[in-house]
Image: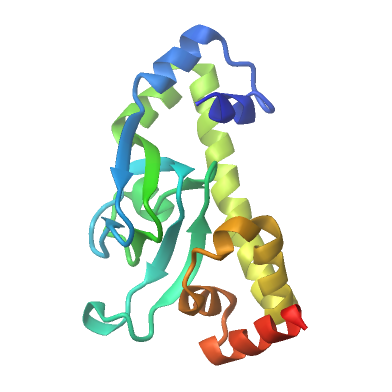
Amino acid sequence: MENIRAYFEKFIDLNDFVWSLFTEKLIEESYPKNAIILKKGEVENYVSIVETGVVRLYIPGEEGSSFNETTFGFAFSGHFFSAYDSFIHRKPCEYQIETITETNIWRVTHEDLSNLYQNTREGNAIGRQMSELFFCGKQNRELSLLTKSAEERYYSLFKHQPQLIKEIPLKYIASYIGITPQALSRIRARVTE
C-alpha cells in the first residue's frame, strides 16, 4: 500500500485523511494461476493494482478456445489494470482478464472511485492520473507495434520485467509482440547465443 501512496505522491499531495478514504475502499482479492478475473461480455466494475503476480488482458479465440487468442497487455506487481473502456462507459467488455500466476490484487469499485473523484480534490487528481496511465500505456503499445521490430518489442518486455517473463508462457509473449511462437523461439535463440 505504501508503494501505491508513494506513486501518487509524485503527482499530488495526499494527506492521511484522503489516503484513508481511498484505502478503506480497497478490496483485497487473491486468485490462483489461470483464473479469469473478468469474462468477455461482463461490465468491468473495478480498477485494480497487482500486489504480486502477473495478469494478462486478451481477446479470446472463437467460442472461448485458446486457439487464436490475442494477448494485448500484461500487468505486473505495482501495475494498475482494468478493462478501462468498459469501466468508464459501463458497457460489456470485448476481451478478458486472467491471471498467469498466483496473483494478489487490490481493487476499488466504480461507485467508490466515482465518489472519491466527486468529493475530494485529491480523488479527482488520482482519477486523472490513472486515466493518463491507461492512455499512455495504450499509446506506447501502439507505437511499439508500429515502430519497433518484434525483436525490439521482446527485448523491451524482457528488460522491464526479466524475472516475471520466465513465468509467462511463450505463446502469450509471442501473441503480445505480434509474432508466432516459432518466430519468438528464433529470437530467444539469438538472445542466448
Where in the figure is residue 28, as x and y percent of width and height? 33, 33
The answer to whether residue 45 shows anywhere in this view is no
Q: Is residue 138 left or right of residue 23?
A: right
Tell me which residue sits at (52%, 86%) in the image.
181
Comparing 28 with 13, the one in front is: 28
Comparing 49 with 46, the one in front is: 49
Comparing 96 with 135, the one in front is: 96
**Which residue is outermost to the front?**
193
> Relative to 149, is 10 above or below?
above
Tell me which residue sits at (38%, 30%) in the image.
113
Tell me which residue sits at (65%, 64%) in the image.
157
> Relative to 52, is 162 above or below?
below
Tell me which residue sits at (24%, 77%) in the image.
64
Where in the figure is residue 14, as x and y percent of width and height? 58, 15
Tell me which corner region of the image, top left, top right, bottom left or bottom right, holds residue 34. Answer: bottom left
> Relative to 147, is 114 above or below?
above
The answer to whether residue 136 shows anywhere in this view is yes
Tell me which corner region of the image, top left, top right, bottom left or bottom right, holds residue 8. Answer: top right
Where in the figure is residue 107, as x and y percent of width and height? 36, 36
Quadrant placement of the C terminus: bottom right
**Which residue is outermost to the right?**
193
Q: Is residue 35 left or right of residue 75?
A: left
Where in the figure is residue 44, as x and y percent of width and height? 30, 50
